[in-house]
Image (cartoon, rainbow, N blue to C red):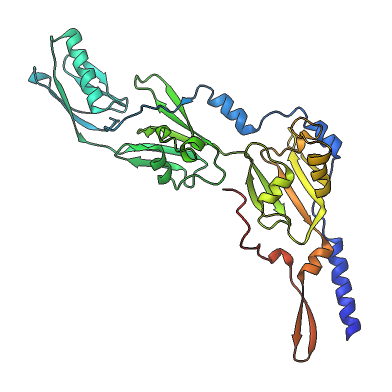
Amino acid sequence: MYGKLALFVLIVILGAGCARQQLQPNVSLEDFDHGFAAADQSDHAEMAAGMFAQAQPAPLNDDITDYVLGAGDLISVTVFEANELNTESRISSRGVITMPLLGQIHLQGLTAMEAEEKIEQALVKDYMHAANVTLFVKERVSQQITLVGAVAKPGTYETKVTKRLLEVLSMAGGLTRAAGDTVYVTRHRRDGEGNEVFLVDMEKLLEEGRVETNMYIRGGDVIFVPQSDIVQVEGAVWQPGPVRIDGSLTIDEAIAAAGGLAQYADEDDIKLIRKDKGGKRQIIQLSMAEILAMKKEKNADIETGPWRQLLLKNGDVIFAEASGLRSFYSGVGFSIGFMGTGVQYRNPVQYRAPAAKPQPVE
């Protein structure tokens, strides 16, 4: 009986040891460093620099407490000095209404007070010595705000009242864990000529309490939340999943953010996977000892040293291989029954991480 048990244990150990490696390295560390030496910034950084180069900071005096007129709104305009100029009209899809004498006048994007002033100025310029205009919104049409990018529920939302940025983000379920530190708000210009883009620094708003950057959002605005640079940490770690690059991030720091290596991990077999410009996966194999040595002993300034490419980049994957023997020993348990002693095997990958481990991404 015990001979058969010993044979079973031996077979399991050999099987676990032979099947442990899941990814095969295909490039040396030197070739990996040389191949990516010319790499510049992440895709997100390039996109932000190109598409939003003209973005301006969020307006600090954006006090839009009044309703902003939009297409479809039904308004009543009263001119006290000339009742024949009184008008009730719905703002067209082009943002205009038609008034006697003035013809078409663009009102979309203005508050009621701004629209009154615009009509008064137009009347005084060509037709009247003085004008007193009152504008009343008789029917408000829900204005649409579009949210895209790293929000929980991207889409188009309707609102009849003016909201600030944080309120609008909450309508979409808030930011995801992958969200970056900036938000772009694209808005039609009031003169109808093109768009303007505002940049909101979410770190200043949320962490420093700079509430003045919590700008008002108008109907028609498009809010884009780009993802931050993210790496994936998988394999024999306690909390596999995405880890955010905040400034600079090394392999050991990413593994620590993922809860650290599991007890069955092979510390001599850590893979770094990165795609080159042609889309081919480059895989190198490192040990934790090599990673720490390059970071602390051989090159204290890793950002400018020969192994600078070990600083993680957007889209990188770190895979910690499991040790076959450690996997087996971690999964062995003893059960003492009424008839004697038995051995059972449990997959250590199914173990749950200790409750005290932090989440990898805030």
Q: Residue furthest right?
A: 3
Viewer-side residue, 182 vs 137: 182
User: Is residue 287 visible from the viewing direction of this image?
Assistant: no
In the rendered image, the vertical position of residue 125 relative to residue 323, given as above or below = above
Viewer-side residue, 6 vs 265: 265
Q: Residue furthest bottom?
A: 339
In the rendered image, the vertical position of residue 126 relative to residue 184, given as above or below = above
Residue 196 x %, y %: 43, 23
Which corner quadrant holds the N terminus? Answer: bottom right
Q: Is residue 350 left or right of residue 329?
A: left
Q: Is residue 261 left or right of residue 32?
A: left
In the rendered image, the vertical position of residue 78 relative to residue 210, given as above or below = above
Q: Residue at x 62, y 28 (%)?
A: 46
Q: Is residue 204 left or right of residue 113?
A: right
User: Is residue 54 visible from the viewing direction of this image?
Assistant: yes
Q: Residue at x 76, y 27 (%)?
A: 38
Q: Residue at x 85, y 40 (%)?
A: 27
Viewer-side residue, 209 vs 1: 209
Residue 265 x %, y %: 78, 58
Q: Is residue 353 left or right of residue 117?
A: right
Q: Residue at x 24, y 23 (%)?
A: 115
Residue 234 x %, y %: 70, 52
Residue 273 found in image quarter: top right
The count of marks equals 0
Viewer-side residue, 184 vs 279: 184
Residue 246 found in image quarter: top right
Residue 293 x %, y %: 82, 43
